[in-house]
Amino acid sequence: QFLWIGLTLKADLPALYFESGDKDKFLALVKKVYQSTDMGMILISEDMDALFSARDICADRNPLLYPVTKENVETAIPKIKEKPTPVGIRGESVEELVPLTTKLKEAGIEDVVLDPGSKNLLEAIRDQTFIRRAAIKQGFRPLGYPTIAFPCFIAENGLKEIMAASALINKFAGIIVLSNFDQYSLLPTLIQRLNIYTDPRFPMAVEEKYYEVLEPDEYSPVLVTSNWALTYFLVSSAVEATKVPAYVCVKDSEGLGVLTAWAAGKFGGDSVRAFIKKCGVADRVKHR
């Protein structure tokens, strides 16, 4: 995980893939992950017996079971209904997903995600776009579900996997499964996700108040800045680097940087003076 302007960026779910052919080994892995973390999971297995045995270990975490296909859907439906959990539907095309979602809905199973079975990045972007447009523009309900994508399966190497993930964050995957966890690859991917899914109408901001950095005392300097998150964390990081304790006073500027806030009349002498009096930092220091 990574600290980024006051936020913790990390992957959300471990995906456990049964590829060894050893069911006991797979179940032991599921149990180990279940006991070592409180996160949910994605369970991936072509072997239905292994898949549902793994589900039974972590059913209280609401794991995503993958894949349900046209070959196993009849077998899977009664087992899914025993302990309802989300399922991932995989087709060989977008069109093949439609009868599968319809069949599951008729059985009362609607907590699903869609995988159109794309074989490469071009197909993945095309299929994700078709699904999104059909659901939103045409109101086609059988495709009105979140989607899942597997750059780990369609990419040739770690770099191309991260490039595919970057494209699919934009177009339009809801869950992206990776095998490349190199920090220099994962961090930019997580930052991109943060930027795409941050509401641009509401800039990232911190609370208006004064912050104590490195345990300041009554003779420590007082710094003032705007409440744009990036500005605050740049200032506080600079204070920490100097190893000189300070009070960092953050005035509400509606998430604008200092220069922009000043130009908009939200960070001027009168308003800063009023804020300093209101926030109470003047009572903590003996200098002016």
Image: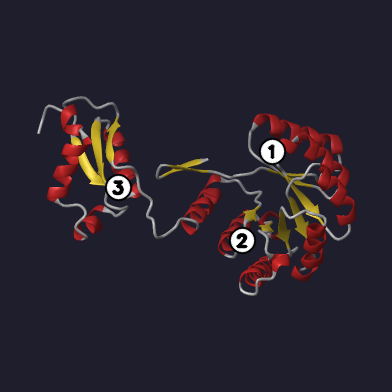
Residue for point 85% across, 42% down = 50
Q: CA distance from mark 1 to mark 3?
A: 37 Å
Foreground tag (2 vs 1):
1
Q: CA distance from mark 2 to mark 1?
A: 29 Å
Residue for point 66% across, 52% down = 177
> Mark on residue 227?
3
Few, some or many residues within 10 Å of mark 3 (<14, 14–19, 20+): many
Q: Nearer the viewer, residue 269 or 163?
A: 269
Q: Position of residue 205 (x, y in %)?
A: 35, 48
- What residue type is disc 2 on? Ala
Number of marks in picture: 3
Q: Which sits earlier in the primary sequence, circle 3 or circle 2?
A: 2
- What residue type is disc 1 on? Arg
State the SS at label 2: helix
Side of 195 relative to 20 (left or right): left
Residue for point 84% across, 50% down = 46
Few, some or many residues within 10 Å of mark 2 (<14, 14–19, 20+): many
Please state, as top left, top right, bottom left or bottom right, where the C terminus lies in the image.
top left
- What residue type is disc 3 on? Asn
Residue for badge 2: 164
Q: Quadrant location of residue 71?
A: bottom right
> Mark on residue 61?
1
Residue for point 64% across, 44% down = 13
Q: Which sits earlier in the primary sequence, circle 2 or circle 1?
A: 1
